[in-house]
């Protein structure tokens, strides 16, 4: 089951009394979000192009979903909360919060992200309403990268071990890349800086992974490696962040360390989201990660752990390069990045020393002379 800690979830709804869920059709009139033009077509983009509108619930009707359910003795995966909490979240809405146009089969709908609309739907477009007014009425401030990460991370990161063992894919939350891949129904200025979104998302992912283990979960060796790889990535990206707890040891050790890391990761996500991000901040972040090749020559770290580090790292470098226009046309840099992607894809054949060499080539292709 995808889960998010109760304290974090409570903070997603700002209104003192939650409003009713009115349904996507309440946003769909041509004078609101169902019309033409970039400022009025949000409902059409979601309903016709965004996989959130139909794909999640449709996946529960596949043979693979039935196989996973069968392995866990789930009689109907289309109705079991372990599945519907992410694939059809509106099914879990209590009757008291269902408006007259509520449709439980809408998938991940408008209000799944923006919040129940009853208290803000008539006022959120008023020119005299500030962002603070909308938030006070219960509309989620998705321009705040910390809040956006909290809305997305549970279903894009957390899957319980029993579901994984039954065949559910392992998930990796990467907020900037996933936002970039989604058909855009918001304006560019509301998207936020890509590098900043990446870092906030990674911190939120670490918080949620740590929360799982701190609440009695027992990670497998693979899950432990993924967890320690993310800790390594964030410690490398933000050396001033003192996680205080080393990311090594066995699964039992990780369970003891997780609660402290949960709190520290949440603090990092909040801190980064509140920053006034600049291109220089992205350059510094990219330089630090590009200088990590010595870590891949460390024989004290297992090859499997190194492979998980490399998988996290190449995704990070890709997002950071993409957020700096001056790097997009630098062919040696792109070639080295493509090679690292290829080297990190095959975990059984992963060669840490070769990867570190390619990483050095990537770093040499950066146009800045200053060291991190």
Image (cartoon, rainbow, N blue to C red):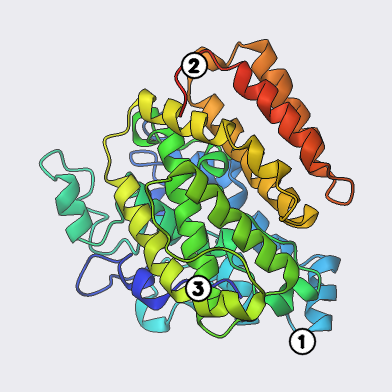
For residue 28, above or below residue 104: above
Q: Is residue 336 left or right of residue 239?
A: right
Report if residue 144 is visible in the image. no
Q: Which residue is mark 2?
A: 325
Does label 3 or label 1 sit earlier along the sequence?
A: 1
Tell me whether the residue at label 3 lies in contact with that at label 1, contact meaning CB atoms closer than 8 angstroms.
no
Q: Which residue is mark 3?
A: 258
Q: Which mark is residue 284?
A: none
Residue sitting nearer the eye, 348 or 60: 348
Residue 44 x/y as whole percent: 51, 40
Task: Give the Cα separation between the discs numbered 2 and 3.
Answer: 37 Å
Query: Which residue is at 54% across, 75% downward?
Result: 212
Does label 2 or label 3 sit earlier along the sequence?
A: 3
Residue sitting nearer the eye, 369 or 26: 369
Residue 245 x/y as whole percent: 47, 66
Q: Which residue is mark 1?
A: 75
Describe the element under mark 2 as helix, strand or loop.
helix
Camera-nearest label, 2 or 3: 3
Describe the element under mark 1 as helix, strand or loop.
loop
Does label 2 or label 1 sit earlier along the sequence?
A: 1
Query: Which residue is at 44% across, 68% downward?
Result: 262
Query: Which residue is at 67% across, 49% downward?
Result: 309
Q: Is residue 299 left or right of residue 124?
A: right
Task: Give the Cα separation between the discs numbered 2 and 1.
Answer: 51 Å
Query: Which residue is at 62% across, 18% downward?
Result: 364
Camera-nearest label, 2 or 1: 2
Name the quadrant of the C terminus.
Answer: top left
Q: Residues within 10 Å of mark 3 (few under 14, many from 20)?
A: many
Residue 59 x/y as whole percent: 73, 62
Residue sitting nearer the eye, 116 or 335: 335
Task: Give the Cα separation between the discs numbered 3 and 1.
Answer: 34 Å
């Amino acid at each position: 089951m995808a889960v998010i800690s109760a304290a974090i979830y409570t903070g997603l709804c700002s209104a003192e009394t939650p409003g009713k869920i009115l349904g996507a059709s309440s946003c769909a009139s041509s004078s609101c979000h169902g019309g033409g033009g970039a400022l009025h077509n949000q409902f059409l983009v979601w309903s016709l192009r965004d996989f959130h509108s139909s794909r999640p619930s449709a996946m529960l009707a596949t043979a693979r979903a039935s196989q996973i359910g069968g392995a866990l003795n789930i009689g109907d995966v289309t109705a079991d909360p372990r599945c519907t909490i992410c694939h059809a979240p509106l099914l879990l809405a209590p009757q008291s919060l269902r408006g007259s146009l509520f449709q439980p089969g809408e998938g991940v709908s408008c209000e799944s992200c923006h919040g129940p609309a009853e208290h803000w739907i008539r006022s959120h477009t008023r020119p005299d309403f500030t962002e603070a007014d909308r938030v006070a009425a219960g509309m989620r401030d998705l321009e705040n990268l910390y809040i956006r990460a909290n809305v997305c991370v549970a279903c894009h990161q957390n899957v319980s071990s029993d579901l994984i063992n039954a065949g559910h894919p392992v998930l990796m939350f990467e907020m900037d890349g996933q936002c970039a891949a989604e058909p855009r129904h918001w304006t560019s200025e509301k998207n936020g800086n890509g590098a900043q979104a990446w870092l906030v998302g990674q911190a939120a992912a670490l918080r949620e992974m740590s929360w799982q283990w701190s609440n009695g979960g027992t990670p497998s060796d693979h899950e432990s490696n993924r967890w320690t790889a993310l800790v390594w990535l964030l410690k490398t990206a933000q050396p001033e962040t003192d996680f205080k707890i080393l990311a090594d040891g066995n699964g039992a050790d990780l369970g003891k360390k997780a609660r402290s890391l949960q709190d520290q990761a949440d603090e990092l996500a909040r801190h980064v989201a509140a920053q006034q991000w600049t291109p220089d901040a992205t350059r510094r972040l990219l330089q630090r990660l590009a200088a990590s090749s010595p870590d891949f020559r460390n024989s004290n770290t297992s090859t499997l752990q190194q492979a998980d580090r490399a998988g996290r790292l190449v995704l990070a470098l890709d997002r950071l390069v993409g957020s700096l226009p001056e790097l997009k046309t630098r062919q040696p840099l792109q070639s080295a990045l493509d090679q690292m992607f290829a080297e990190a894809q095959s975990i059984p054949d992963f060669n840490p020393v070769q990867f570190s060499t390619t990483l050095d080539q990537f770093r040499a292709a950066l146009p800045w002379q200053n060291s991190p």
